[in-house]
Amino acid sequence: MLLKYKYKLKAHKRQAVIMSNWLSMACCQYNYRLAERLHWFEATRTPVQHCPLNVSVVGRFRCATWKA
C-alpha cells in the first residue's frame, strides 16, 4: 500500500536561482513576522498576579475578507 508520494524537482539553473530567491524571501518574511509577534508579546506582557481573568492579551483578529 502506497502511503505517500515523493516528488523531485529537476530545475534548470535559472529556475533554481528563482526558487532559491523565493525561499530566501519567504524565510526573511517569516523571521520578520516572528520577531514582530515576539516584540508585541513582550510589549503587552503583564505579570500573572495582575492579569484579570476577563481580559485577553491576544489582539483582535482582523481579516480583509471578513468583516465583523
Image: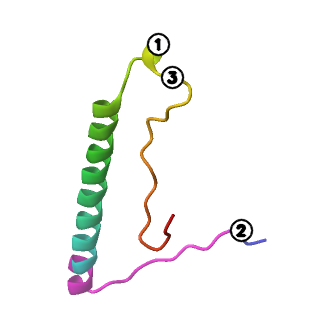
What kind of residue is marked 2? Answer: Leu
Q: Residue at x 43, y 60 (%)?
A: 62
Whole-percent x, y for residue 53 in the image: 56, 25
The residue positioned farthest toward the right in the image shown: 1
Q: Which residue is mark 2?
A: 3
Residue at 35% across / 27% down in the picture? 45
Local crowd at mark 1 within 10 Å, few (<14), some, or many (≥20)? few
Q: Is residue 57 above or below residue 22?
A: above
Q: Is residue 57 magenta?
A: no
Above or below — where is 10 with respect to 27?
A: below
- Measure how far apart labels 2 and 1 are at the Cα level: 50 Å
Q: CA distance from mark 3 to mark 1?
A: 8 Å
Using the image, determine if residue 33 lies above or below residue 26: above
- Comes first in the chain, label 2 or label 1: 2
Q: Are marks 3 and 2 in contact (CB under 8 Å)?
A: no
Amino acid type, residue under disc 1 in the picture = Gln
Residue tagged by mark 3?
Answer: 52
Name the chief secondary structure element in magenta. loop
**Circle 1 is placed at which residue position?**
49
Q: Alpha carbon of mark 3 to alpha carbon of mark 2: how far?
A: 48 Å
**Residue 10 within the segment the image draws in magenta:** yes
Left or right: 55 with respect to 44? right
Q: Which residues are magenta?
A: 4-17
